[in-house]
Image (cartoon, helix red, strand yellow):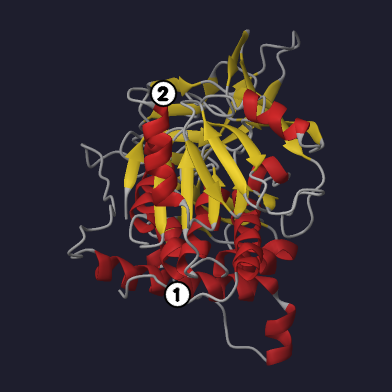
Amino acid sequence: MKSSVDSASGSRDARVADRKEKLECESCVVIGAGVSGCACAAVLASRGVATTLVNSALDVTGMPGYGPVLSHVRPEEARAVVAALDALPMEMRCAWLSGSLLCRPELTEVAGLIVDPRAVSLRVKWVLEQYPQLQLRQALVTAVQADGDGGWIIRSAFDDELRASYVVVAVGLSLGGRLTVGMQTLEGGRYGEVASDELLEVLRGLGVKCEVSSLSVGHTECATFTDLPSGSVAMERLDDARRKTTKRSSAAVSADPWFVWLEAVERWGRESAVWERGVSGEERGPAPLLSYSLERNDYVRPSWALSGSTQNEDCGDGARDAVVLYPAGLATAEWATAERATGNSVDWDMPQEAHRSRPGYEVRAYVVRDVDDEGRVSGLDGIWAVGRVAGASSYVESLASGVRAAAAVAAAAGPTTSCLESE
C-alpha cells in the first residue's frame, strides 16, 4: 500500500514516465475520496481490482462533510437503508458504525444513526490503507481524456498523469462548487476544499450534461450542559443496543420494517464490537477507535439530541424556527443542526455558555444529469459518476451508489479474487 503526495518540483517528463510505469496496469481511478468514492474504492479493492483513489486532500479521506446524521429512517425507508449498509464490505461498514449513536424508533417517530465525522474519517482511511490493491493519491484532478486505446488519461493540476481502463467521478459538490456563507461566496463544495472548475469544463467538452444542484448545511454549536433542555431525546451506542421487540409470527415480522431495522442494529452492534476487538492490537497499527470524554463529570454526555429554537432575524415579526442539535464532535462538545437555521442565536431552557463554531451555509454546484442506476455516464464508455455529483441526497444514498458502481466496474474488469489481507 502506498500513499503519495503530488509535488510541483522536478521534471514533468521524469515524473510522468515514472508514475506511468507504476500505474500502467491500474484498472480504475476513483476521483474523490468522500463518502461515495471511499465506498466504491473499498468494494473494488476487496474484489481484487487495482484501484487508485485520488483526492485533493487526503487528510479528509472518508469525511462526512455535511453533518453527523448518517441516516434518518422512517418506516418505509428502513429496508432500503439496511440493504445499503449491508452491501458495504464488513470492515468499511464497521468503520462507519463503530461508536455510532442510535436514535430508537420507540423514542421518536424517526429512527436514525449519528456518527462522529472526524472519527469516521480516521477509521475509513485506516481501512482503505489495508487493501493491497488500493493506492491513495493526493492530487487535484483537472482533466480526463480518452487515450485512444479504449482507456482514459487522468491529469492533475501539476500535470501528472494516471492511466486507467475505468474512471469513477465521485467529486461531491465540487464541480463549479460555490459556498454562500452570509454575504460571502467561497469556492469549493465543502469548507476548505478546492472547486473542480477545470474538470467541469472538461466533462462538458466530452458531452456530459450537467445541471445545477444546491444543498443547505446546518450550523454547529459548541456548548456544554449541566442539565438537559426540555424535548431532548436519548440515544445509545450502537454496540450497546439490544433488540427490544417481542417474538412474533413470521408474517408479522415481514410486515414490520421497524423489526427489520432493529434486527439489523443488533447485528451491526455485535459485528462492530467484534471488529473493534480484532483491530485494536493489529501489527499494522490499531484502527483509530477514538474514545471521548469531557473534562468534567457533571456535563451532559454527548449522547442526546437537543431541541431548541432560533430567532429568525430575517423576519421582522419575531418569527422563530425549531432546531434540533445532534452530537457532532464528541471531544469538542460540538453539536450540529440537521438543516440550515437562518437565525443567529439559539435559545435554550436554561442558562449556558455557547458559541457558534461554524455558521450554516448554502452549496451550489453542477451535478451529472445523465447516469443510469449503476452510475454509468451516458455516451462515455468506461466513466461512472457516483454520490452527490450523480444526484445522491444523503450519506446512505452516496454509499449505495458507490457500491453499485464498483460492482459494475468489477464486472467489466473481469474475474478477480479478493485480495483483502485476512483479518
- What residue sits 72% from the left and 34% below the top? 203
Examine the image and state in which quarter residue 259 appears. Answer: bottom right
94 or 220: which is nearer to us?
94
Q: Measuring from the top left, give residue 104's x and y in whole percent.
A: 55, 61
- What residue sits 61% from the left and 22% below the top? 361
Asked if 366 appears above or below 421 in the picture, the reply is above
Which labelled disc corresponds to residue 351? 2
Question: Is disc 2 in contact with disc 1, using a CB cutoff of under 8 Å?
Answer: no
221 or 119: which is nearer to us?
119
- What residue sits 33% from the left and 33% below the top? 332
- What residue sits 36% from the left and 26% below the top? 11
Q: Residues within 10 Å of mark 2 (few under 14, many from 20)?
A: few
Q: Residues within 10 Å of mark 1 (few under 14, many from 20)?
A: some
Helix, strand or loop at mark 1: loop
> Amino acid under label 1?
Ser
Query: Where's the N terminus, which quadrant?
Result: bottom left
Helix, strand or loop at mark 2: loop
Examine the image and state in which quarter residue 345 appears. Answer: top right
Query: Where's the C terminus, which quadrant?
Result: bottom left
Asked if 333 appears above or below 261 in the picture, the reply is above
Which labelled disc corresponds to residue 418? 1
Count of picture labels: 2
Asked if 172 appears above or below 107 in the picture, the reply is above
Which labelled disc corresponds to residue 165? none
